[in-house]
Amino acid sequence: MKPFILKVPATTANMGSGFDTIGMALKLFNEYEVEEISKGIEVVGTENISLENNLVYSSMLRTLKKYGHMIDGIRICAKEINIPINGGLGSSAASIVGGIMIANQIMGNNLTSHDIICLGTEIEGHPDNIAPAVLGGLTVSIYEEGNITCSKVKVPENLRFAIMFPTFSVSTQHARNVLPALYSKSDCIFNISRVALLIAAMSNGETDKLRMATEDRIHQPYRAILIPDMNNVFSHAKELGAKAEVISGSGSTLMAIIDESNRDFQEGMQKYLDTLKEKWVVKVLEVDTEGATIK
Ligand code: HSE
């Protein structure tokens, strides 16, 4: 096996109304340099994480085991870790997809994107970050009985995604535990209509419909208590001309959808974030259309 560079994008799940279904890849990457060595497994550059707890390593090993493949030695060097851990930008999905793709490379590259998404979802538990991390773009995914059906949706080129991430994190498990077990029929209809509109609005470039299309009654109202200042940040984003505001995944990152022409958003938002008790940073990103790559 020749040495290679693996790049995996950050992903934002849910986009408001599409809980556990919609995900989108963003141009913010973790990058690894991988090479075969004569003996042993070395994972370097991922400080304070033991091998057992390293998701890249454990996902690689699980995939190799599943296909009955052995390795003598491999060195995985994390060159750039830009995706915040536990931040709602798919850091675990990026590590899982990274590990499976390394295994795939070792095994001769026979797994399809669909295989990688199925394996990744088996490890992660839900497909919404895994599918866009593999395929890039905006994806709709359904996971049923171990199989994934997913479809990629066009994202208007003039959209940009402002991510506002605080120094505190929110555990996905905790953010799932705060959700009710059952929902009313009216709340289900509310979200079904919004998520259908989200796909239509994205496909048709009707970006003025995104505010309504991202409205949600399934998870965001319950998660607001986990993210201090969420509603204030959302109000401020709206004042700065955002088209919509959502929690990225299960948080703590918040995301505003803006037009590329909204050049003042980042500075205006950072100024506002600097007045808050917690430290927050805003970055404006483009959609990544490629997904994870090996070069
Ligand atoms: N759809 C998941 C959730 C994403 O909101 O719990 C978590 O990364």
Image (spheres, grey):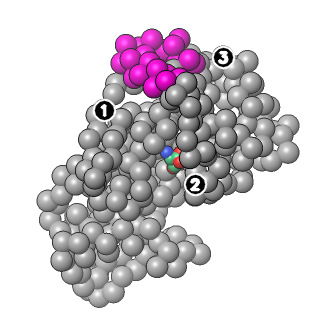
Q: In the rendered image, which residue does mark 2 sit on?
A: 172
| Marks 2 and 1, how far apart at CA | 25 Å
**Tag 3: Cα neighbours inside 10 Å, few (<14), some, or many (≥20)?**
some
Distance from mark 1 CB to nearest ligand 1 atom below 8 Å: no
User: What's the residue at 59%, 31% (across, down)?
Assistant: 217
Residue 98 seen in the current view? no
Kind of element beneath mark 1: strand
Report the Cα–Cα distance between label 2 and label 3: 29 Å
The tag earlier along the polypeptide, 2 or 1, is: 1
Amino acid type assigned to the residue bearing label 1 in the image: Lys
User: Which one is in front, 228 or 224?
Assistant: 224
Q: Is residue 174 above or below residue 224?
A: below
**Which image quadrant: the N terminus?**
bottom left
Residue that mark 3 sits on: 241
Marks 3, 1: nearer the viewer: 1
| Image x and y of residue 189, in percent | 49, 24
Q: Residue at the spot x=34%, y=59% of the render?
A: 122
Provide the major secondary structure of the magenta segment.
helix
Q: Position of residue 63 (x, y in %)?
A: 27, 69
User: Pointer 1: what residue?
Assistant: 152
